[in-house]
Amino acid sequence: MINQLPVAEPAEVRAAARRDLRAERRTVVGLVLVNGLASAAGLIGPWLLGRIIDTIQSGSGDVLSAVDRLAFGALLFTVVQTVLAWWALKIGYRFGERTAARVRERFLRRTLALPPRVADHLPAGDLISRGSTDAAVVAFTLRSAVPEVLVALVHALFLIVAVLALDLRLGLCGLVSLLGVGAAVRWYVRRARPAYLAVAATGADMADVVASTAKGARTVELLGLERRRTEATEAAVTRARSARLGALWLRTVLFPWAEVSLALPVVGVLLVGGALYTKDLVSLGVVVTATVYLRQLVGPLDTLMLWIEQLQGAGASYARVEGLADVPTTDAEPTAVPNADGDRIRVDNAHYSYTGVRDVLQGIDLVVQPGERLAIVGTSGAGKSTLARLLAGLDRPHTGSVTIGGTPVADLPPDQLREHVVLITQDHHVFHDTVRDNLLIAKPDATDEELYAALAAVGAMWWEDLPQGLDTEVGDDTELDDAGAQQLSLARVVLADPHTLILDEATALLDPKTARQTEQSLAGVLKGRTVIAIAHRLQTAHDADRIAVMEDGELVELGSHDELVSAGRVYGRLWQTWHAETQNP
């Protein structure tokens, strides 16, 4: 299992960001243009204020009329700036929503495109964290931070250019005073990426520990592992807390440093401007205008400072979301597909180990003919479920091969694999949606008659008692019990109509009578197709064409029920024990 999913390098994140920007280039151009106009309009007011001061100071002509005209112009351009700034933010929010949706869809596509053998071994907590928390952070940033930051950047750029154009000396004085802000930001950015990656990684690790503990609660209780799991959880929480405190410490340095640095440009210009004014090198209006420009510069710089943490956190989240593209698949892209004899499954000298130390499957040789019903039986830990995973292409043998029509099952692309082999376990998922939509996942173009037939095929007639039939939403008011949820999962298989169906405890949550009815219904629907059942009830094995008996990772017997009972070996003993228990409960 991969302990931690890859994280995209900064260059990969920048490339992904450029692709997202190119996809919305018209919107980005419009955003920059409108934003530039808003910033330009915002420069007129302070300039007119300087003109008002110089006009009053000169005292020549109709001062009152001139001041009124200049004041009206300042008011007009302030209104224009407000309207343009609102328009720019509106464009920016739309850009953010569309780009956030694109990022989420790209993550989902990459997840669904992963080969089953890879996806099944991914750390669930880390994957869920990236698809939920990290994707949400990226979406929020694109929706809110990016427009506001872009507005602030353009506004700051216009103000800096304006004060330089107004008076080069005052402009340079203001820029020199801003060096402290640049130094603070540089110090923070160099340390922020690893800090926020650590926050995300430890948070995912904590979620994984908590989820695995909750999922295995019964096992923890039965084996007395409460203290061990508590210690593991506390350790994960401690690591997450330390990582978050480390990231917060960076803020305690950045913001005080930045606050002091932001006050320096105004102070510097007032001091230098005052000295120049006393020597008649600049007018009072120019000094006031430059001071107002630099005072206005505090606004966009404040915005940038407030968002810089969010941007660093979002950058780390973006790297985690994009990192899914770097998940190793270990194999070249498959090109071969099963031939005309594609229903035949062949296992040749297959060995498999979860740890690389001890083989849990040893030298398995097996041929499953098209249309055959094969039952795999054995005691707990014999390797039945592991063999099922190899047959379904979820794992690949370390030595030997598992093929369908001559092509390794694990090499089939996900869409082709589902057409040939489907593995159904006792784990199932019912989406918070209508019964109809839960079924249409397997066959989007299915008619209502096909949906009814699929439910009837697995004995799920409970749908007739639902308040709105197939349109009943499963979730808040209507919930399915474990048996109903499993029947819904089996109905999806009927709709998917695969060549080969592998059942691993697929009816384990049903009562014996319902399980028997479901298996009989499935047998009728899947007649002529290959069915491989991991048989925990030997009655299931009794009905199969052949029975494969597993013991300690080896295939020790293979034959029909009557043949194996007559042989009196492993299966014969299992049958006699089970038969005696059922006769004398």
Image (cartoon, rainbow, N blue to C red):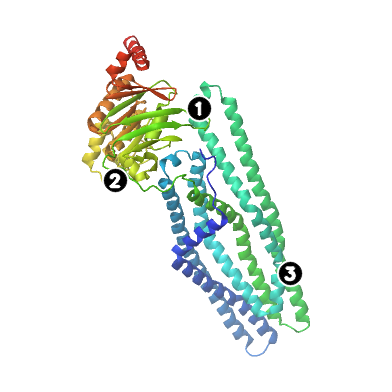
Query: Rounded to the nearest whole Å, what is the CA distance between mark 1 and mark 2?
Result: 37 Å
**Front in this rendered view, residue 267 or 23:** 23
Residue 267, disc: 3
Alpha-carbon neighbours of circle 2 within 10 Å: few (<14), some, or many (≥20)? few
Taking the spot 59% from the left edge, 29% from the top edge, the residue there is: 230
**Viewer can see residue 246:** yes
The answer to whether residue 355 is left or right of residue 290 is left
Label 2 residue SS? loop
Which of the two discs, 3 and 1, labels the residue nearer the N terminus? Answer: 1
Alpha-carbon neighbours of circle 1 within 10 Å: few (<14), some, or many (≥20)? some
**Quadrant of the image containing the C terminus:** top left
- Residue 258 x/y as whole percent: 69, 60
- Residue 229 x/y as whole percent: 57, 29
Amino acid on which the number 3 mark rests in the picture = Val
Residue highlighted by disc 2: 444
Proximity of marks 3 and 1: CB atoms separated by less than 8 Å: no
Taking the spot 68% from the left edge, 49% from the top edge, the residue there is: 249
| On screen, residue 251 above or below 515 | below
Residue highlighted by disc 1: 217
Which of the two marks, 2 or 3, is nearer to us in this view?
2
Query: Rounded to the nearest whole Å, what is the CA distance between mark 2 and mark 3?
Result: 68 Å
Which of the two discs, 1 and 2, labels the residue nearer the N terminus? Answer: 1
